[in-house]
């Protein structure tokens, strides 16, 4: 119980940095009930005006996938769009508890139906989160997630690993995260100063070169909202990232961590890029669900993020594969197909989609991170000062 309370404290205090009188949207699964209750309690204790839990449940979603017509699965509802608009206008904070309790819940389902979702609602949420709301996403331990990792529902062992990754073992975890955020922000500033025009990832099965947008900003650690309030979008976070020019990715990647996508486990994923676009998908398992997501909209096949992570991360130190993208992406370098981050370019949040597209930013209803880092990965950057080593054999050397 002490760990759950410390977890909730980090989420509310360091994650969204909740301010008195602010509303909270809590996205959570039925498997996270005990942790969700602790987060709600901590939020109200910190002065929340209201907390609105939004529940999801795997078996209920499977029922929809199996029985609802495809058009209904994709249809956005006016009341849902209005609710998102009101959250944005009120400046609410958004907390998402992750940790898939059953990655096999959609096994055997039609991959096209499994990948279907209300696209307009997803875009509205993403615009609100990226431009108006302070938000955080955190992995919540549960028996199903523990079983994915250890082969048995050993939740105590999972809590030990999560506590290491989230710095819950520190005397003041929130303060420890603030210190780590400063280190990552300094790395971002160092990258900004290089004015890089492209970045190259080179490792076992990976050789990918991606062009960068002139003047793009590298973000590390936390972020600051329009009112100057700092927050951590992801806990844990060990990355420095930006959005690339979507038109420029060339080469191949080998994904080094399993991916859970639309309730399916994807392993051994390999992608080929040409002209910025994913042109070939192969995998040991789950290639069909990846292909289905890449067909979601025109931007889904293009990159929206490139990220740098080295072996010094707490997630890497935990020494396990978490089977959770939030954690595993912070164990090594990663890229993401789909939506770009408008804040990656000066004035990007105020631009129209057309203006962002002109710069090379991507627009999509999806954003899926895949890890390509680990032992042996080398990352170089090229700019007006020539080519420099950033990461060599999974160690930050810049």
Image (cartoon, rainbow, N blue to C red):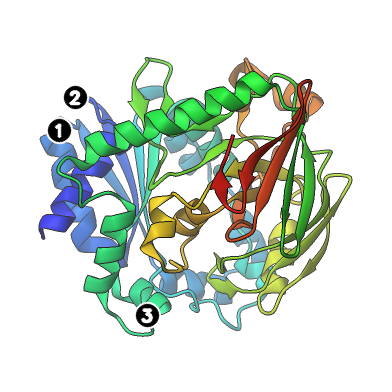
Percent position of residue 328, x then y: 49, 59
Please tell me how crowded label 1 is: few (under 14), some (14-19), or many (20+) other residues with Cα within 10 Å: some
Distance from the alpha carbon under mark 2 to that under mark 1: 6 Å
Residue sitting at 37 percent across and 15 percent down?
228
Percent position of residue 305, x then y: 64, 41
Please tell me how crowded label 2 is: few (under 14), some (14-19), or many (20+) other residues with Cα within 10 Å: few
Tell which circle, 2 or 1, labels the residue nearer the N-terminal end: 2
Residue sitting at 58 percent across and 29 percent down?
218
Percent position of residue 309, x then y: 53, 46
Task: Name the residue nearer the viewer: 299 or 233.
Answer: 233
Distance from the alpha carbon under mark 3 to that under mark 1: 36 Å
Quadrant in which the C terminus appears? top right
Residue 151 falls in image quadrant: bottom left
Residue beneath label 2, please?
Answer: 20
Tell which circle, 2 or 3, labels the residue nearer the N-terminal end: 2
Residue sitting at 39 percent across and 67 percent down?
57
Residue beneath label 1, please?
Answer: 46
Residue 50 falls in image quadrant: top left
| Vertical relation: 101 (above or below) 356 | below
Quadrant in which the N terminus appears? bottom left
Residue beneath label 3, please?
Answer: 150
Tell which circle, 3 or 1, labels the residue nearer the N-terminal end: 1
């Amino acid at each position: 119980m002490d760990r759950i309370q410390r977890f909730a404290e980090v989420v509310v205090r360091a994650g969204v940095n909740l301010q008195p009188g602010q509303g909270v949207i809590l996205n959570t699964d039925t498997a996270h009930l005990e942790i969700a209750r602790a987060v709600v309690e901590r939020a109200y204790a910190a002065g929340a005006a209201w907390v609105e839990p939004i529940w999801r449940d795997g078996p209920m979603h499977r029922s929809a996938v199996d029985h609802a017509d495809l058009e209904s699965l994709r249809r956005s509802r006016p009341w849902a769009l209005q609710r998102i608009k009101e959250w944005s206008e009120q400046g609410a904070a958004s907390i998402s508890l992750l940790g898939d309790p059953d990655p096999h819940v959609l096994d055997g389902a039609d991959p096209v139906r499994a990948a279907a979702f209300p696209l307009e609602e997803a875009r509205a949420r993403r615009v609100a989160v990226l431009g108006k709301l302070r938000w955080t996403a955190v992995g919540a331990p549960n028996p199903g997630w523990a079983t994915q990792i250890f082969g048995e529902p050993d939740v105590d062992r999972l809590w030990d690993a999560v506590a290491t990754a989230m710095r819950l073992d520190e005397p003041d975890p929130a303060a420890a995260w603030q210190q780590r955020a400063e280190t990552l922000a300094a790395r971002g500033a160092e990258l900004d100063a290089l004015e890089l025009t492209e970045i190259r990832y080179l490792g076992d099965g990976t050789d990918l070169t991606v062009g960068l947008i002139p003047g793009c900003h590298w973000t590390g650690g936390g972020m600051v909202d329009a009112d100057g309030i700092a927050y951590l979008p992801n806990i844990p976070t060990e990355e420095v990232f930006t959005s690339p020019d979507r038109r420029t990715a060339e080469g191949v990647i080998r994904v080094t961590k399993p991916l859970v996508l639309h309730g399916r486990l994807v392993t051994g994923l390999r992608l080929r890029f040409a002209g910025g676009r994913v042109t070939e998908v192969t995998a040991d398992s789950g290639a069909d669900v990846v292909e289905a997501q890449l067909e979601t909209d025109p931007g889904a096949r293009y990159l929206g993020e490139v990220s740098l992570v080295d072996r010094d991360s707490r997630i890497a130190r935990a020494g396990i594969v978490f089977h959770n993208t939030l954690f595993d992406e912070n164990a090594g370098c990663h890229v993401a197909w789909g939506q770009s981050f408008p804040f990656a370019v000066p004035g990007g949040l105020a631009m129209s989609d057309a203006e962002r597209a002109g710069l090379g930013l991507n627009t999509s209803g999806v954003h899926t991170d895949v890890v390509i880092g680990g032992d042996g990965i080398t990352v170089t950057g090229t700019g007006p000062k020539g080519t420099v080593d950033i990461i060599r054999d999974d160690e930050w050397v810049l």
